[in-house]
Image: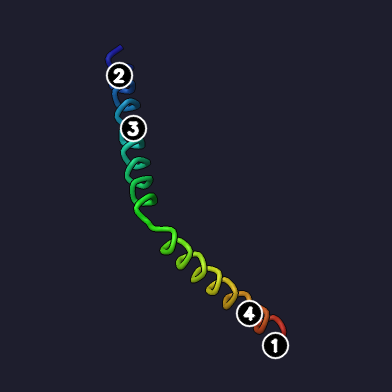
């Protein structure tokens, strides 16, 4: 019967740790200004476009 208690405590610890990770990520996400988010999204879009162009160039060769 003791192993059930240990398993339960491990589950509670896992849920608490997950909550901490989620809270940290949320704080980090909210700390960006709208201009920073816009800049990052545009950079990612440009990267994706370059990768697509490179892929198409390789396929047509």
Of residue 8 and residue 27, the one placed in the foreground of this image is: 27
Q: Residue furthest top?
A: 1
- Cα distance, mark 4 to mark 3? 43 Å
Dot 1 or dot 2: first in sequence order is 2
Dot 2 or dot 3: first in sequence order is 2
Q: Quadrant of the N terminus?
A: top left
Residue behind mark 4: 53
Q: Is residue 61 above or below residue 52?
A: below
Residue at 69%, 80% in the rendered image:
59
- Cα distance, mark 4 to mark 2? 56 Å
Residue behind mark 3: 14
- Cα distance, mark 3 to mark 1? 51 Å
Dot 4 or dot 2: first in sequence order is 2
Q: Is residue 60 left or right of residue 41?
A: right
Residue behind mark 1: 61
Give residue 11's position: percent from left, percent from top: 35, 26
For the residues bearing labels 4 and 1, Cβ distance under 8 angstroms: no
Closest to the camera, between mark 1 and mark 2, is: 1
Label 1 sits on a secondary structure element that is loop
- Cα distance, mark 1 to mark 2? 62 Å
Of residue 51 and residue 27, the one placed in the foreground of this image is: 27
Residue at 34%, 53% in the rendered image:
31
Dot 4 or dot 3: first in sequence order is 3
Q: Count residues near mark 4 (Cα–Cα under 10 Å), then give few for <14, some for 14-19, many for 20+.
A: few
Please identify the quarter of the rendering in which residue 37 is found. bottom left
Residue at 51%, 68% in the rendered image:
44
């Amino acid at each position: 019967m003791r192993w059930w208690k240990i398993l339960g405590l491990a589950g509670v610890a896992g849920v608490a740790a997950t909550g901490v990770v989620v809270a940290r990520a949320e704080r980090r996400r909210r700390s960006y200004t709208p201009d920073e988010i816009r800049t990052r999204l545009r950079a990612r879009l440009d990267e994706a476009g370059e990768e697509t162009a490179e892929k198409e160039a390789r396929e047509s060769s």
